[in-house]
Amino acid sequence: MLKNLYKSLLASALLAGSFTACSNDKNVAGGTEAESTVVALQIQVSGNAAYSRVRALPDDFLAEEATEAEWIETDENGFVKIPMEPGAYTVEARHVDGSDATGAVYSVALDSSSSNVIDTIKLVELSSIEGFVLLGESTPVIRIAGLDRYVVPDSTGHFVIDSLPTGSFEVLFGDPQTINSAKVESTTGDTLYVDCSDSVVQVTGSVESVATEVPNGDWNEHAALLAQVDGYAVGVLGAAGVTDSLGNISAAEGEICVVTTTEDYVIVEDTTEVDSAGNAKTSAVIAPGSLRECAYKEGPTWILFEKSGTYNLESPLRLGSDKTFDGRGRDVRITGMGILTQESSNLIFENLTFTAPAITVQDTSSRRALSLHNGTHHVWVDHCVFEEYPLVELDVKRGSHNVTISWSRFENAQTGVLFGLAADIIMDTAQSLTMHHNYFAGLSRDGILAHGGKLHAYNNFFDSVEKSGVVCSDAARCLIEKNVFNNELPVTLYRWYNEDGSPVDSTVGFVNMVENKFSAGGSDSDFADHAVGFVPDYKYESGLADVSLVLRLKNESGSR
């Protein structure tokens, strides 16, 4: 996963505590004008450094394109003499021995009174600076002053500057057309995250995610999990509650069921029925100790997993009420036919990964990873991963309400979350959904597609979503608050448009946009003339929409 990629670097940039706003710095690929006097810089590379490579560039040099400046090779003793004009320079040395590489950076100032300057450079292990920059309307270039480094971030804003020796570097982020740059003093040792899409630069160091321990069946651990519920799902008790015939949830003593096998069904023989060839009749039965066996238990059940593994559902898993699926501390991957609810309630899905469905064609029969249907209510989906589904990964529809989806990842699909059905199928005003601290990436259409009902989306990150971050249509009331949108079309109000491009008014949604951050287009004021939506009837805390939020969601969303 992406967050693991960010942890795998050899060494990254640690803030030295000083940074500036975007500035105009037009010294690109040049530096100071040369004077007439030439002096000699003599460098002795220490250690086993015969035939190392050395180059010197003006200390304000900024590469114009992805090229490599000329290197000079040392002799068998690691010695090199470089004719240079007076001025300030950054000298870089590199030595490669098989698969091992070492290097060093050295600053030197030469004036016309100097005839020879002699110094020694000690080679050290190479490292990398890795980072993430929120993309603006144009893709910035990342450079290091005085070094021949020119890096363009990928479509998600991720970049790596590799083959750097340990040291302090001035990293510059700038638009290649205007040369506006953000200067950051950094040293290796931690991940560097920089946002220079606005006039103010924000820089944040990485935060190590703390692995979650495996629950041991202590109900206090279940209670601690419930203490984290917020949004519309408040009141859910999962395995610690029971739902009555009116849909009310009250505390109850549940049982624990531990999943001990990754099998779903097993084939058994009935020796009482044998055909003429001597073959016994066979049938598929639910495997003892399976996820399905635990899920089908009557009454409130806390479902734990003995081991990590892939649990393939050979047929849809249709759930009743009052269950907690708790994958904390394990890598629980659910594949196959997906999970469906039918007038169910009081459900918790914690720390699960839904991946690789059995149906992979893009048609309406494609199975969702998780479908909450027909009046399902009080459901909490937390720290889950949804990936590799052809159409929609999770849906909440047909009157389902009081649902919260938090700290989860939606990747590699057409749409992440479908909320409700189009108004010409069913007009739904009762459904309600809170979505907070979720990460959306690699979606070919929309992050959240809302038809009717009440949607509260806050502190989410929409990255590399090709269409809309949020579609609010068919009279849906949407409070979209303090999210980060790294896509060109953050929000869409209409489901249908006429051939001339005008919207079909009957499909409009009603949006209130509050303090969101837009790095690739859009603003809160785009919807100033639209209805203000609604105010949620629950208490919640939302953080700022900034690069710190992006960093947290990249590192902490999904399974833990």
Image (cartoon, rainbow, N blue to C red):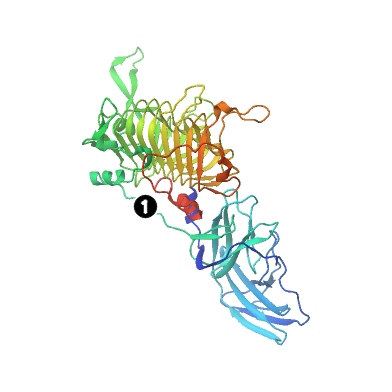
Within 10 angstroms of label 1, few (less than 14), some, or many (20 or more) residues? few
Q: Residue at x 71, y 82 (%)?
A: 40
Whether 232 is drawn above or below 39: the answer is above
Q: Position of residue 273 (x, y in %)?
A: 30, 15
In the depicted structure, whether residue 137 falls above or below residue 293:
below
| Residue closest to the eye, 310 or 357 | 357
Residue under numbered circle 1: 211
Going by the picture, which residue comes out furthest to the left? Answer: 253
In the image shown, does 313 or 233 lie closer to the viewer? 233
Pinpoint residue 77: horizontal percent, then vertical percent: 63, 79
Q: Position of residue 463 (x, y in %)?
A: 54, 45
Q: Residue furthest top?
A: 276
Residue 288, located in which quarter of the rendered image? Answer: top left
Residue 383 shows up from this direction: yes
Whether residue 263 is visible to the viewer of this picture, yes or no, is no
Element under label 1?
A: loop
Q: Is residue 531 above or below residue 14?
A: above
Query: Residue at position x 64%, y 73% from top?
Result: 90
The amino acid sitting under disc 1 is: Ala
The foreground one among 530 and 493 is 530
Compared with 21, 380 (above or below) is above
Residue 172 image-quadrant placement:
bottom right
For the image, the number of numbered tags is 1
